[in-house]
Each structure stands twice: as structure tokens, then as C-alpha cells.
């Protein structure tokens, strides 16, 4: 069938999206018809849709856009690079310089390999651990998100009712072998994790954890406990820093929480909006990617056609150049605190049981009495998720773009007035959701 004639009208584009994109969506949620829109452009903290409506953006492309949309330093860097070529697969100056900079910034990073997405990064970090240890299993935490590869789509959601450490697939199409190689532990529960490791330790190649799991902070001692446990059992500890990297602190969650893993994965804020991700870590682990090992089973191939392309690496250099400026992380922390405090204050005024999870420039409203603090995915099940989704939709109706029921991401482009405007809309949205 021939595509319809092109038009920039929102209605036409939405009709075409519904026709040509599954669910009329680009990701795992869609909006009801009265709120659906197509993005025309973004600038700073704002988005505009093709019908001309403006939104304060707290989705930020699912987190990457930590500097705000179309940041001039990124635009200039990418424009300068694109004229020199966009991909070579081979070494380029932006790639090498970015590798140096990340290894300077990140405590665990002695060497690095670039890939294109966070999914690839976590999948391949697990591969490195398997090659290095000769073991197969990976232990992850219930509710931890590591992308959409087969080992990651296990034990994430509330539907997974299996007792620990058995895991259920979250979606279709996950082979039994993949499911059987994953063990699931409850986040922030070191004692249960230790029991699982005591039983399966010799089979476990890696423990992978989001140091800040979604918006749930680690309990004091939990990450250090994982560090000690993994060391005792010869297990590779992987911090998935796809969200926390260059966001919570210049050195990411490992600097913020003061625990250094063996490997860490990066994406999102690394380039503030371009296709680049990375696996970084101890040199002896990263050496498994050395092409001199080709032809042996000691080799962990980690790469792809566009991995580390100079366009994305130039964007990464420009982004990190902005993020390493003085005061950046204090400002991001302040923005997060104002938003979280504002959300809880609004709920308190209205007598609504709600807590705002998160750390740094991340906030997630959760409809659960603050007397029951959330420390795990199972704790979250007691919260009213339907109400959180309704709140999100009401915010979108009021020009505040959020992932309904999910996290809100802040950028350096968000102003205090943006927060004030958002909290005003939230006050109103809470009354009707
Ligand atoms: C912690 C974490 N790890 C990995 C991923 C996967 O990254 P990507 O969507 O780039 O594949 C995500 C994506 O949201 C994430 O939040």
C-alpha cells in the first residue's frame, strides 16, 4: 500500500503512526487519543508538538537529555563532526579522547568498549563476566531494568510471582535456557542475596545491579555488601549505570555511593542524546575483548557496525565537557530535591498518601503512605499504580510531559520557574486523579 501524502498536521501524523507503527507507539506505552501527539522539536526543557502545543519535558528521551534539548555545545560539536564523516567503525580521535575522559571520570574504568545502546552494554558486560569466570549464571534484582535482551527481560515486573531465586520471563519469546541462567534476588535484601549466592555461587558469573534501582535508593551498606559478597565468591560485580552514569555525580553512582564495581555500563547521559553506550571496567576483564583472542573461547566480542561512531563520540565529548563544569551536580541535586519536596508537599496538603522516590535529578511520585518507605519492587506492589498513571495523564493534559506512572527526569535546562509551573499543574492534577 502506498503511504498517504505527507503532511505535518498532528492528526495526519497520528493516523499514519497508528497505521504503520505497532500500537501507534515508539516504545512500551501509548497515549489516549485526546492526549496523543507527535513531537515537532525540542529546545531546552521544552518540547513542541506538531499541533504547536508546548510541554515542559520530564521524559527527556527516557533520560539522556540531561543538558536539555538542542544544547548549543552539542549541536556545534555534531555539526563540526558530521562534515568530517559520520562513521568509520575504526578508531577516531573523538572515540579515543572520549575513552580517556571516561576512564578519568569513572572509578572502576581502566578500559572501555563502546557500543550503541544500554541493552547491548548490559548484555555484553554479562558476556565479559561469563568469559572471564567460565560460569554461566547471572544474578539480578527484582525490578531492576537492564534493557530488553533475553537475560534482562526476566524478573522485572510484579507479574513475576516466582519465589527467589527462580525467575519468570516478563515477555514472550525468551528461551528457557536464558531464563534458567538468571537468578533473581530482592533489591536491598542482602541476607537473601547472600543465601542465593551461598547456594549457587560457583555457577554465578555476574551480579548485575542498578545502584539506584529505578528510583529506589540502595539501603546503607547494600552495595558494599554486594561488593564484599562478589569478591568472596569470585563473581564479577556489574553496576548498570545507564541511568546513573554522569547523572548522580561526575563519577556516577560508584562515586555517589562510594562503592567501586568490577564493570559498569553507560548510555543515556553519556552523550545527552546520541546513540552511544559503553562497557567500562577493570583491564583484566576488558582484555577479554582484545581481538588477539579471536578464534578462542576466551574472547568476548563486544562491538557493532556503529559502535563508537565519531558523531556520537563527538557529542559525548561535548556533553561531558558541559557536565564536568563546576556546580553542575549541585544544581541537578537541588532541582531534584525541589521537585520531590514540592510533590510530597502538594500531596500532604491534599491529604493524599504519596511519596516521591528518587535521588539526584530523578523523581517518581508513588501513591503509598510515606510511613511505608519503598525499598524494593515488592514494596512498590502495595502502591496504587493506576492512580500514578492517571496523575501522569492529567499532567500531560496540563502541558507537563511525563512517563505516566514512571520516573521524571530533570535536566540542567529546567529552571526554577519550570518547577514552580510543574508543581502548580501537579496540585491541580492531583485533585482529579
Ligand atoms: C538501567 C538501565 N539499563 C539499561 C537500559 C537499556 O538501555 P537502552 O534503552 O539504551 O537499550 C536502560 C534503559 O532504560 C536502563 O534504564
Image (cartoon, helix red, strand yellow):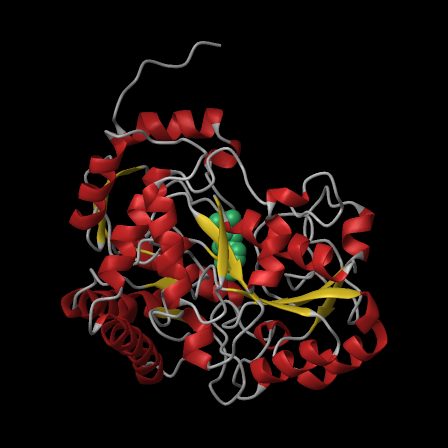
x 56%, y 62%: residue? 283
x 58%, y 56%: residue? 286
Relative to 403, say whether 12 is above or below.
above
Q: Nearer the viewer, residue 141 or 90?
A: 90
Residue 201 coordinates in the image, percent (x, y): 80, 73
x 30%, y 17%: residue? 6
Q: Is residue 261 left or right of residue 74?
A: right
Residue 69 coordinates in the image, percent (x, y): 24, 49
Q: Give the position of the C terminus as an image quadrant.
A: bottom left
Q: Nearer the viewer, residue 14 or 130?
A: 130
Q: Nearer the viewer, residue 154 or 293?
A: 293
Q: Quadrant of residue 189?
A: bottom right
Relative to 8, say whether 196 is above or below.
below
Residue 34 coordinates in the image, percent (x, y): 35, 43
Relative to 1, say whether 409 is above or below.
below
Q: Nearer the viewer, residue 419 or 72?
A: 72
Q: Is residue 390 left or right of residue 394?
A: right
x 42%, y 39%: residue? 91
Amino acid at each position: 500500500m502506498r503511504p498517504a501524502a505527507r503532511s505535518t498536521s498532528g492528526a495526519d501524523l497520528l493516523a499514519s503512526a497508528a497505521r504503520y507503527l505497532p500500537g501507534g507507539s515508539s516504545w512500551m506505552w501509548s497515549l489516549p487519543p485526546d492526549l496523543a501527539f507527535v513531537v515537532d522539536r525540542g529546545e531546552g526543557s521544552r518540547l513542541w508538538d506538531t499541533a504547536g502545543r508546548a510541554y515542559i519535558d520530564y521524559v527527556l528521551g527516557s533520560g539522556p537529555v540531561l543538558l536539555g534539548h538542542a544544547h548549543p555545545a552539542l549541536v556545534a560539536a555534531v555539526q563540526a563532526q558530521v562534515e568530517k564523516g559520520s562513521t568509520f567503525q575504526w578508531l577516531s580521535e573523538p572515540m579515543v579522547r572520549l575513552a580517556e575522559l571516561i576512564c578519568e571520570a569513572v572509578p572502576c574504568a581502566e578500559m572501555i568498549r563502546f557500543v550503541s545502546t544500554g541493552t547491548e552494554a548490559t548484555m555484553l558486560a554479562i558476556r565479559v563476566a561469563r568469559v572471564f569466570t567460565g560460569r554461566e549464571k547471572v544474578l539480578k534484582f527484582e525490578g531492576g531494568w537492564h534493557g530488553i535482551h533475553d537475560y534482562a527481560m526476566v524478573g522485572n515486573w510484579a507479574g513475576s510471582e516466582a519465589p527467589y531465586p527462580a525467575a519468570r520471563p516478563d515477555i514472550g519469546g525468551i528461551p528457557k535456557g536464558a531464563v534458567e541462567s538468571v537468578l533473581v534476588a530482592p533489591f536491598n535484601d542482602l541476607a537473601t542475596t547472600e543465601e542465593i549466592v551461598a547456594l549457587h555461587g560457583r555457577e554465578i558469573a555476574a551480579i548485575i545491579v542498578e545502584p539506584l534501582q529505578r528510583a529506589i535508593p540502595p539501603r546503607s551498606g547494600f552495595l558494599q555488601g554486594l561488593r564484599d559478597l562478589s569478591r568472596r565468591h569470585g563473581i564479577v560485580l556489574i553496576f548498570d549505570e545507564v541511568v546513573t552514569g554522569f547523572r548522580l555525580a561526575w563519577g556516577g553512582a560508584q562515586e555517589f555511593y562510594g562503592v567501586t564495581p568490577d564493570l559498569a555500563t553507560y548510555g543515556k547521559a553519556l552523550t545527552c542524546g546520541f546513540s552511544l553506550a559503553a562497557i567500562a571496567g577493570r583491564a583484566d576483564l576488558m582484555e577479554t575483548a582484545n581481538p588477539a583472542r579471536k578464534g578462542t573461547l576466551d574472547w568476548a566480542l563486544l562491538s557493532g557496525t556503529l559502535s563508537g561512531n565519531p558523531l556520537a563520540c563527538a557529542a559525548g565529548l561535548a556533553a561531558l565537557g558541559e557536565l564536568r563544569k563546576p556546580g553542575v551536580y549541585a544544581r541537578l541535586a537541588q532541582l531534584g530535591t525541589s521537585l520531590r519536596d514540592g510533590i510530597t508537599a502538594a500531596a500532604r496538603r491534599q491529604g493524599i498518601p504519596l511519596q516521591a522516590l528518587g535521588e539526584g535529578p530523578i523523581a517518581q511520585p508513588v501513591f503509598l503512605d510515606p510511613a511505608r518507605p519503598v525499598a524494593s519492587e515488592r514494596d512498590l506492589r502495595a502502591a496504587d499504580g493506576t492512580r500514578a498513571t492517571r496523575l501522569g495523564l492529567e499532567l500531560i493534559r496540563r502541558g507537563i510531559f511525563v512517563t505516566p506512572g514512571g520516573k521524571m527526569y530533570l535536566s540542567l535546562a529546567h529552571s526554577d520557574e519550570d518547577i514552580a509551573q510543574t508543581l502548580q499543574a501537579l496540585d491541580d492534577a492531583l485533585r482529579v486523579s
